[in-house]
Image (spheres, rainbow, N blue to C red):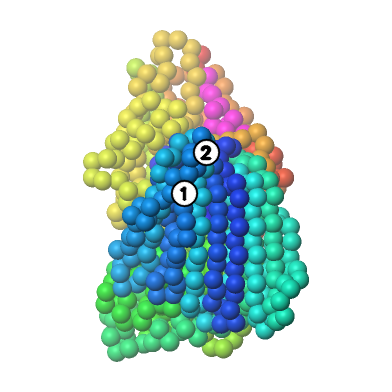
Amino acid sequence: MRSYRFVLALVGMMLAPSFALAESADTLLDSRQTLEVRADGGYSKDVRESYRVNDAGGIKVFSQYPLSFSPQHETLTIVEAYTRTPDGRRIDVTPDKILLQQSAESADAPLFDDRMVKNVVFPALEAGATVTIHYRRDVRQAILPGVFWLYDSFPRNEEVRSADITIRAPASLPLYAEAIELEGGEEASGTPGVRQWHWHLGRQKAEVIERGAVDADDVSPRLAVTSLPSYDELGRRYSQRATPQARVTPYIASLAQEITAGSRNRREAAARLYRWVQLHVRYVAIYLGDGGVVPHEAETIARVRYGDCKDHVTLYQALLAAVGIDSRPVLVNAEYAWWVPQVALPLGIFNHAINYLPEFDIYADSTALNLPFGVLTDAEQGKSALVIANDGGLSSLQRLPVATPQSDQVRVLTHLQLQADGSLTGRSEVEESGVYEYFARQVFASLSDGEEPQAAATGLRGKGLIGNGDLREDLRSGHPYRFLTRFELPDFIDPTAPSALIATSGLESGSGLSSFARDATLLNVRKFPMPLLNGTREEVVFLHLRPSTRIGNLPRDVDVTSRIGRYHAHYRLDGDTVVAERKLTIARNTVIVPASDYGELRLLGRAVARDLRTQILLP
């Protein structure tokens, strides 16, 4: 599954996803997958694929082509693999070039995952060569007993010539399928008691998935197949295996009492337990499915102090139960993909687990370090997620909350001083709450001691400002999170000639107004939807001038409202100080901006960008 990565940077640096090129590093020339499904949900999968290597990127892909598997549940057999050189020579992959290795996750946490990897090292790779691999995967034991499922996609930013998927299953095993942009469906099998489905994808040209767009899987041909009749049934199956693992043992009960001792109320107790799991249980990023869907026992997790997402959920669930607070597991997608099929796909779409606390109507993800209690990450907001019922009730898809202008805010208070030599000095106080607090804490957590001045200079440069500065956390702050900055911009104006000043916020926040303006105006048009967080971004700038300085003008006030949000800016003169007050509010019931609304977003972004560049004339 492809995804983009948000790069957290400070002060005017945008949250930037990876960028897919229009030309694929390789071309999928032919793919043929045939699955023979058994009544118990197990299956054999025969895959034969040929790729053309287009450039150095393709060479890198196939220099070590990994195929992962779980020895506990399946057998992976490489039938054949070879390279066909541009001049037609066939060079086989010899057995000694199929390297069996432990997965990185297994090596890091062997108790929790048995995944292995077969790395196929293709020889004689060069642009224009083709590689062919034929392998068979025999799944002896379904991850969910009796349940078959398949999810496959053909990312739109990859070139495809032809792909076929065929599934054969006993008539006694009902299958439910949803295919997007694939031709086919059920067809005659020719075998009594056996049903057959076939889907085909013809030629697909590689397209640019624009910077900042949703995951390629959301906009690509894809297929979801499952034997589960409903998401409620999926919840019941998951709960049957996961709930017993959250048993409250004497050790768990004692630990919960120790952590919550002195709590003023039940919500504070829940927050303390959340923070303890977040800080003391090392998160091992093994997606659901890789290590199975059965978490380990809560006490085991508490003692070894590491686990994957479902282990985090189980331990937190047990600790909460020990103090009488109900919680429920929630299955969600951890990538920047929001599509959920109508058919009840167990895994593939859902690859992450978090907790839901009904008493407080909040969701909690303890795997994300520095994420405040009750706040969702940007990749989780607005998703359709499966809330699991523990008491035999109805499990159902629920829409996860989105950020709001009241709870998710960036506030920047900046004081600027124009010096006699034309330099500009400044200091800012920055407060961030909700998901924006998470971003800011992540940035500071990534800095080593002594790197703050370098980060400050980088942040200034990201806003087109040349100077130096420093930044530091306000260690006394809780929520909202607070940090302080100072900076100096030498030679900002020529004091001997008519000049113009901008009321810059200087060192502010990677989630501030300038970052929004840059993200919202990145492209002229968009073809694919993009995520956009709600919230309030506000800054007040006090530009302190020397008493002898005359003002030629004040910028005009700005008030722009669109379907996306509202931006307002007001300027006033208070003695020798120019005061600029700016506020952007976005309050939508979704985080997704469809391509058809991008024009509205861009107009709002242009208004913000234009106002941030507004000049104050000094005659």
The residue stretch that appears in magenta? 606-617
Q: Can residue 463 be seen in this view?
A: yes
User: Residue farthest to the right?
Assistant: 188
Query: Is 491 positioned to the left or the right of 537 in the image?
Result: left
Farthest top residue in view: 496
The spot of residue 415 in percent (x, y) is 40, 35
| Mark 2 vs 1, N-terminal side | 1
Q: What residue type is labelled 1?
A: Tyr
Would you say 23 lies left or right of 291 here? Answer: right
Q: What residue type is labelled 2?
A: Gly
Disc 1 target residue: 82
Q: Which of marks 2 and 1 is in front?
A: 2
Which x, y percent locates residue 106?
A: 33, 65
Residue 614 counted in the magenta span: yes
Question: Is residue 426 within the magenta segment?
Answer: no
Front residue of 582/314: it is: 314
Q: Quadrant of residue 572?
A: top right
Towards the viewer: 429 or 237: 237
Q: What secondary structure is marked by label 2?
A: loop
Q: Which mark is residue 251?
A: none
As drawn, which residue projects farthest toward the left?
Answer: 449
**On the image, numbered disc 2 is attached to which residue?**
88
- Residue density around tag 1, few if under 14, some if 14–19, many if 20 or more, within 10 Å: many
**Marks 2 and 1 close (CB-CB < 8 Å):** no
10 Å crowding of disc 2: few (<14), some (14-19), many (20+): few
Residue 95, image x and y in percent?
A: 37, 56
* Residue 414 point in image, percent of width and height: 42, 38
Which residue sits at x=64%, y=46%?
A: 161
Secondary structure beneath dot 1 equals strand
